[in-house]
Image (cartoon, rainbow, N blue to C red):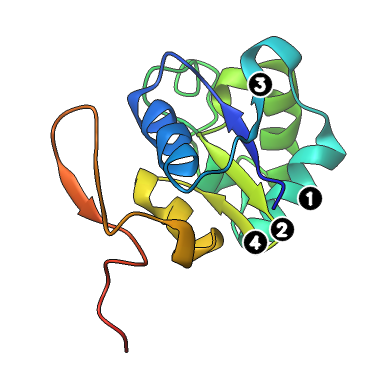
Amino acid sequence: MIVVIHHNPQCGTSRNTLEMIRSTGIEPVVIEYLKTGWTRPQLQTLFAGAGITPREALRVSKSPAEELGLTREDVTDDELLDAMVEHPILVNRPIVVSPLGIRLCRPSEKVFEILDGTAAPATFTKEDGETVATSKGMPSP
């Protein structure tokens, strides 16, 4: 299974997500989007696949979103996309792509929704010591 993570190594959620992927035995393709940047079609594809809007993907905390006026209700999706291409930090992270789907992995355990549950450990311990159940560790519906 090929998995791609759009990753920010300075972010604890992104680091946890990367380690969760690795805990299933997968070595993902890691794209440090702050170095590579985004293209508009790339963002549109990722957001559509994840079922989110540019506004839902907008990172407000620790980003220039407020000072750029991007949190106003009248800002359009096109304006948000343009800003995200110009300022990659405006995209919330991590975004993970697998054959099973695309997710904005906040919280990080959302990644297990798009990984092979049979390869996942029953639980995973995050950097901060919090233990979460994986899809393998979840009761059957």
**Tags 4 and 1 in contact by the CB under 8 Å rule?**
no
The reply to whether residue 7 is visible in this rendering is: yes
Residue 74 % position (x, y): 58, 44
What label does residue 48 carry, if any?
2
Instruction: Name the quadrant containing residue 28.
Output: top right
Say what amino acid the circle numbered 4 marks. Gly
The disc, 4 or 1, on the residue closer to the chain's N-terminal end is 1
Name the residue beneath numbered marker 3. Answer: 33
**Tags 1 and 2 in contact by the CB under 8 Å rule?**
yes
The disc, 1 or 3, on the residue closer to the chain's N-terminal end is 3
Q: Residue at x 56, y 53 (%)?
A: 103
Is 11 rendered above or below residue 5? above
What label does residue 9 carry, if any?
none
Mark 4 neighbour class, 10 Å CA radius: few under 14, some 14 to 19, many 20 or more: some
Say what amino acid the circle numbered 1 marks. Thr
Q: Residue at x 36, y 33 (%)?
A: 16
Cα distance between the residues tagged 1 and 2: 5 Å
What label does residue 101 carry, if any?
4
Q: Residue at x 82, y 35 (%)?
A: 40
Say what amino acid the circle numbered 3 marks. Tyr
**Which residue occupies the extreme left position in the image?**
129
The disc, 2 or 3, on the residue closer to the chain's N-terminal end is 3
Cα distance between the residues tagged 2 and 3: 18 Å
Cα distance between the residues tagged 1 and 3: 15 Å
Is 68 rendered above or below residue 52? above
Mark 2 neighbour class, 10 Å CA radius: few under 14, some 14 to 19, many 20 or more: few
Instruction: Name the quadrant containing residue 41.
Output: top right
The disc, 4 or 2, on the residue closer to the chain's N-terminal end is 2
Cα distance between the residues tagged 4 and 1: 12 Å
Q: Which element is circle 4 on? A: strand
What label does residue 45 carry, if any?
1
